Image (cartoon, rainbow, N blue to C red):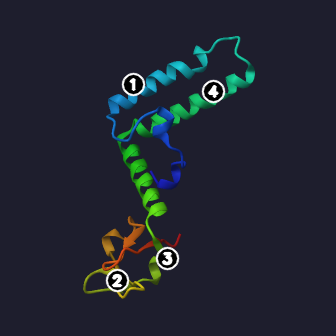
Amino acid sequence: MASEDLPCKDWYSILGAESTESLTEIKQKYQKLVLLYHPDKQNTDVPAGEVEKRVQRFIEIDQAWKILGNEERKKEYDLQQRESELTNTWPVEAQVLLQDMSWNNDDQCYISLCRCGGQYILSGSEAEDVSLICCNTCSLTIEILHNS
């Protein structure tokens, strides 16, 4: 599943869960919320606007479970959240197109020079998977953009 397929929502908070909780704990929270918000479980005397809000909440709860209840999707989501956290908190010096980096045939890696004189080094095998690279001598980071 590509990371762009996952909307930028906090699925854990929707379920009232933490990323450190086990699948069983997350499932229990999901089940409690489903019983609370399922359209078939709603009182008939609830105003129409409230019914719509509850149905929307139920849909979010269901979406959250579809991601967090599947190990592969959960792992992808957790990685996306971590990358987003790093992007938002780590000093990103620049965005660099992969094809603008120099290719080192001997070491089989891409290299870009940092303003401190150090280097950003990306192995050829990681080129498609990695989007942030730290300088090898300072704390600056660049974001690698892939030509679509």
- The amino acid pointed to by label 4 is Val
| Residue that label 4 marks | 55
Residue 31: image location, x then y, percent: 44, 23
Mark 2 and 3 residues: CB-CB less than 8 Å, in contact? no
Mark 2 and 1 residues: CB-CB less than 8 Å, in contact? no
Q: Is residue 63 above or below residue 31?
A: below
Badge number at residue 119? 2
In front here: 116 or 104? Answer: 116
- The amino acid pointed to by label 2 is Gln
Mark 1 and 3 residues: CB-CB less than 8 Å, in contact? no
Q: Residues within 10 Å of mark 4 (few under 14, many from 20)?
A: some
**Which residue is farthest left?**
106
Q: Residue at x 51, y 31 (%)?
A: 62
Q: Residues within 10 Å of mark 3 (few under 14, many from 20)?
A: few
Q: Nearer the viewer, mark 3 or mark 4?
A: 3
Q: CA distance from mark 4 to mark 1?
A: 20 Å
Residue 111: image location, x then y, percent: 36, 83
Badge number at residue 28? 1
Residue 124: image location, x then y, percent: 32, 75
- The amino acid pointed to by label 3 is Ala
Badge number at residue 94? 3
